[in-house]
Image (cartoon, rainbow, N blue to C red):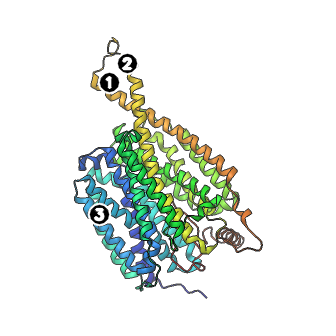
Amino acid sequence: METSPSLSRIWPLFAGVGLALGMGSFDGASVQGIFPYVAGGLSTSSDHALWTLTYFIVHWSLGITLMPWTTARFGMRRVFQVAVAVAVLGTVISAVTNNLWIMLLSRALEGIAAGLLVPLGQSLFLHHSPLKRHGLVTIFWSNAMLVPFFFGPTIGGLLATELGYRSIFLLSLPIWGVALFLGSLGIPKEQGNPLTPPFDSWGFGLLYGGLMSMQIVLDQGEQYGWWHSTFILKMTLVAFIFLLLFAWRESETQHPLLPLHFLRRRNYWLGLLLLCLGWAMFMGWASILPLWAEETLGFNGFWGSSVLIPIGIGAIPLSTLMDRLRGLLGLRLLATLCFAIFAFAYGSAYLSPISNLGDLFWSVLFIGMGVGMLFVPLTMIILSGLSAQEIPSAATTSNFIRVFSANIGVSLLSVYWTRYSALAGDHLRGHISRFNPETTLSAQHLHTLISVQADTLSIDNLLRLSMWICLIAAIGAYFFIIPPSTLRSADGPRNYVEEEEDEFSAAASAGSAPYNHSVSRSPLRGHVGRMSRIQQPLP
């Protein structure tokens, strides 16, 4: 019989690791609505201040790839301590630097630490809780990241408005210290395995070089004129070569950093494509809407960031109901409905220069509902047909690709907004003549009105484009995803989705709570496999 660990032994682990998880999410989310404030402190533009988010995300994704090998080699306790120490170092540098490039270095350190903590926290919670409590533990794990992720921009906006944006980092330092103390107290000491297969350093180096080159293209392409610039052409070629060599390396090495052979499966690559699409668009809009509210409508950092609060209100409750819904509708229909909700949210939003934040409440709420429905069905579709032993490596690859896709969404939506704002501004100016006797506004006032109107028109056009993309995604999900139930084989090994569905059916027939099993429940969560069947830490 499985015995439950005593509360006095495990509460420091859950409190310390949960606090560290929350702070990792807060580090990434707190700057989403205060780019003008960061730009002022670093003597740069808001476009360049946006890099403090994109560099965090790219290193966040890279941190995920480090977790499986580091925990196997050095043990979970030591990896947790190093991750928190790296986060503290990055936080200190972020709080004191006035230089953009040093700030990007500090954000890279914070991103690496957050990337390590997400799957590490998942593994620690599941390893140190009984199997029957994995559902409850999963909810705790998810909320430890969901709440700071959705409400962090508002908290960051309030601190930036009242105390300055550096206070975000300064006030987080003692919380990191408490997390380190409690986590070190609660995580059991363990020795790493010195016989762990060697780390794929060549693969990591190629991946890092390719991603950073791609990030330079995404961040600076607009500034240099994209492929009209020799510099951007060279960086694009470097990114392509490095990533191509990385793919070749991973297919040849015995112990790859990221196994890529799963991408041959239709449900895997299609489900991952849809997951990346939904996640990237959400992250892009979560960055653009506060910036538009501040720069165009004139709200301060707190009120501009508060436009994202309905996302959490819509996402968190609905994500807890996904177990019931997948039993009623099935995974393919849930994925289709998710993108239909996204399409409705983007299509129903309408902005104008005289909008108030309340005008966006319902549209943003529906975006949150779509986020709450995004991860459970698509994660299970991605893992459909895979055995329990294949889940860790498959989920590591999918988590890495999904997290990095946020960078693409943030960068592309920002570029679209900038370019089409300029185009709309030129079009509006073409209809105004300085010889018109009815034009009584000063040139400066007129320029401001045109800029505000152009920025808003660009946002509206981008919302409609997002709506059509989500409608196409919904159609693709319905017609091209293979229902996981059809992948069952009578004489073959039981796969992940079959076991999950059987467990759900058994729990439902016994009148159990809707979360007595392990499944992904949050945007920051990759998967929860069968811990009784998987002998290595889950990435």
From the viewer's side, name the closer residue of 151 and 268. Answer: 268
If you read the primary sequence from the N terminus, does the residue marked by circle 3 or circle 1 appear first? 3
Query: Residue 331, percent across and down?
Result: 66, 59
For mark 2, what is the residue?
Answer: 432
Q: Residue at x 39, y 76 (%)?
A: 79
For mark 3, what is the residue?
Answer: 91
Going by the numbered disc 2, the residue's amino acid type is: Ile
Left or right of 323 in this view: 405:
left
From the viewer's side, name the closer residue of 432 and 104. Answer: 104
Residue 446's disc is 1
Occupied quadrant, residue 533: bottom right
Going by the numbered disc 1, the residue's amino acid type is: Leu
Q: Residue at x 36, y 43 (%)?
A: 230
Left or right of 491 in this view: 219:
left
The N terminus: image quadrant? bottom right
Secondary structure found at label 3: helix
Secondary structure found at label 1: helix
User: What's the CA distance linking mark 2 and mark 3?
Assistant: 49 Å
Q: Is residue 57 visible?
A: no
Label 1 packing within 10 angstroms: few (<14), some (14-19), many (20+): some
Please say if the residues under marks 2 and 1 sit with CB atoms less than 8 Å apart.
yes
Residue sitting farthest toward the bottom = 1
Label 3 packing within 10 angstroms: few (<14), some (14-19), many (20+): many
If you read the primary sequence from the N terminus, does the residue marked by circle 2 or circle 1 appear first? 2
